[in-house]
């Protein structure tokens, strides 16, 4: 009997993941505000009632997409936390962020970038901001100066630039990401070598 229940749960999880995947693509390409639950259901080939079984609102779908993202970012910071008092530890954290970003869907990057205002105005936006501030604070290290804080934000955005610009025709995506990480690390170091 337990196996039968496990099969039902697995199907529900698969459907939920399909909904999140389709919604992510539509939110990134059309915008969160411009995408309806009907469009998501149509794209999935299900009724709105079937969609409602898993998510009652677009906001719940968005929370599902972004909740997973925040969990992963927070786990990366948690793992790095014991080493953040050194420059080497903060550089390692930046490398881990770059690795995670390389595994994320371009749609997720597009969703966050193109719908930043809408996301910020939702209740979940406060959690996104808090996680972002935590990551930036971890990269900055103890007792940061204004210059340290500006370096960290600039390094962080260098990684994002690679993620949204990786469709250059004459360059491999992996090469763009590697170049962006090199630039981000140079910015983070601020001309310094070794531990601070």
Image: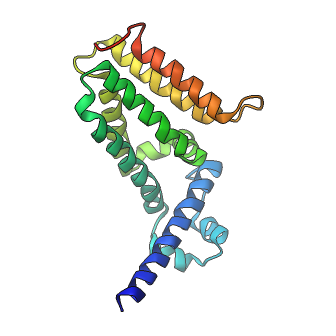
Identify which residue, 116 or 142, lies in the foreground: 142
Q: Kindly indicate the quadrant of the structure image that contains residue 129.
A: top left
View extreme (bottom): residue: 1
The residue drawn where x is 62% and y is 56% is: 26
In the rendered image, residue 118, in percent from the top left (x then y), is placed at 49, 45
Please state, as top left, top right, bottom left or bottom right, where the N terminus lies in the image: bottom left
Q: Tell how many labels.
A: 0
Please say if 52 is above or below 79.
below
Identify which residue, 24 or 82, lies in the foreground: 82
The residue drawn where x is 45% and y is 82% is: 7
In the rendered image, residue 161, in percent from the top left (x then y), is placed at 57, 29
Please state, as top left, top right, bottom left or bottom right, where the C terminus lies in the image: top left
Q: Is residue 65 left or right of residue 47?
A: left
Q: How is the image coloured?
A: rainbow
In the rendered image, residue 162, in percent from the top left (x then y), is placed at 59, 30
The residue drawn where x is 33% and y is 33% is: 133
Q: Is residue 34 visible?
A: no
Please say if 87 is above or below 137.
above
Identify which residue, 101 or 122, lies in the foreground: 101
View extreme (right): residue: 170
Q: Is residue 82 visible?
A: yes
Please say if 32 is above or below 85.
below
In the rendered image, residue 86, in percent from the top left (x then y), is placed at 27, 21
The residue drawn where x is 53% and y is 32% is: 160
């Amino acid at each position: 009997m337990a196996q039968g229940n496990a099969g039902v749960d697995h199907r529900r999880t698969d459907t939920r993941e399909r909904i999140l995947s389709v919604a992510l693509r539509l939110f990134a390409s059309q915008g969160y505000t411009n995408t309806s639950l009907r469009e998501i259901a149509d794209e999935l080939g299900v009724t709105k009632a079937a969609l409602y079984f898993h998510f009652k609102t677009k906001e719940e779908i968005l929370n599902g997409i972004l909740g997973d993202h925040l969990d992963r970012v927070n786990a990366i910071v948690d793992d790095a936390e014991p080493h953040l008092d050194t420059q080497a530890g903060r550089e390692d954290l930046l490398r881990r962020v770059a690795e995670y970003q390389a595994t994320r869907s371009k749609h997720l990057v597009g969703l966050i970038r193109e719908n930043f205002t809408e996301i910020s105005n939702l209740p979940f936006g406060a959690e996104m901001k808090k996680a972002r501030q935590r990551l930036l604070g971890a990269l900055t290290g103890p007792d940061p100066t204004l210059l340290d804080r500006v370096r960290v934000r600039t390094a962080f955005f260098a990684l994002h630039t690679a993620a949204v610009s990786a469709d250059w025709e004459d360059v491999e995506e992996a090469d763009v990401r590697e170049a962006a990480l090199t630039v981000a690390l140079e910015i983070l170091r601020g001309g310094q070598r070794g531990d601070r």
